[in-house]
Amino acid sequence: MTTGNSFEGYKIDRYLGVVRGVTVRSASAMGNFTAGLQGIFGGNVQAYTELAENSRFEAYELMVGHAAQMGANAVIAMRYDATEVAQGMTEVLAYGTAVVIEKIP
């Protein structure tokens, strides 16, 4: 996995296409309550930080699974994107290009 367009010491043998993992998440009522209390005092809002990390992890894992289904052993140009799809619900997208790489002798 790389955000770059190549892997040092490897050559891209085949490009398999775009892969993605998508999840839509929202905080629970308790999470929103806790976040509201933390927001009063300022600083890191741990409930939302955990939600963001879990969402990115889930989208990433889904993308990795999609790449494996396509026969890839690597993903290049990997990125994340997020969009609010409804009030309090956020779509997190992990995407990149699935490739087959091999070590340069």
Image (spheres, rainbow, N blue to C red):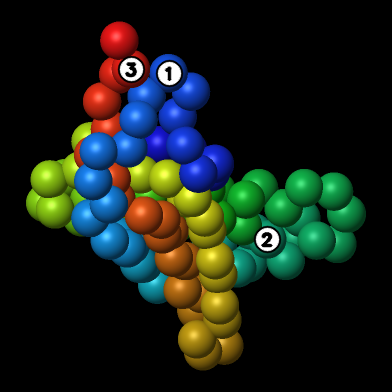
- Residue 48 falls in which quadrant of the image? bottom right
Q: CA distance from mark 3 to mark 1?
A: 6 Å
Q: Please, what is the three-letter code of the amino acid marked with disc 3?
A: Ile
Mark 1: few, some, or many residues within 10 Å (few <14, many ≥20)? few
Give left or right: position of 14 versus 49.
left
Q: Quadrant of the N terminus?
A: top left
Circles 3 and 1, Cβ within 8 Å, touching? The answer is yes
Q: Is residue 91 left or right of residue 104?
A: right
Label 2 secondary element: helix
Q: Vertical placement of 97 versus 14: above or below? A: below
Q: Which residue is mark 1?
A: 9
Mark 2 Cα-neighbour bin, 10 Å: few <14, some 14–19, many ≥20? some
Q: In this view of the protein, can residue 23 be seen by the observer? A: yes
In the rendered image, residue 12, in percent from the top left (x then y), is placed at: 32, 37
Q: Which residue, as the protein is rendered here, is positioned at the far right?
A: 41
Q: Which residue type carries mark 1?
A: Gly
Distance from Cα at disc 2 to Cα at disc 3: 50 Å
Q: Position of residue 20 (x, y in %)?
A: 33, 62
Which residue is labeled 2 in the image?
35
Q: Position of residue 71 (x, y in %)?
A: 12, 45
* SS for callout 1: loop
First in sequence: mark 3 vs mark 1: 1
Q: In which quarter of the view is residue 25 placed?
A: bottom left
Say above or below: 27 vs 68.
Answer: below
Q: Which residue is mark 3?
A: 104
Identity of the residue drawn at 28% across and 61% down: 17
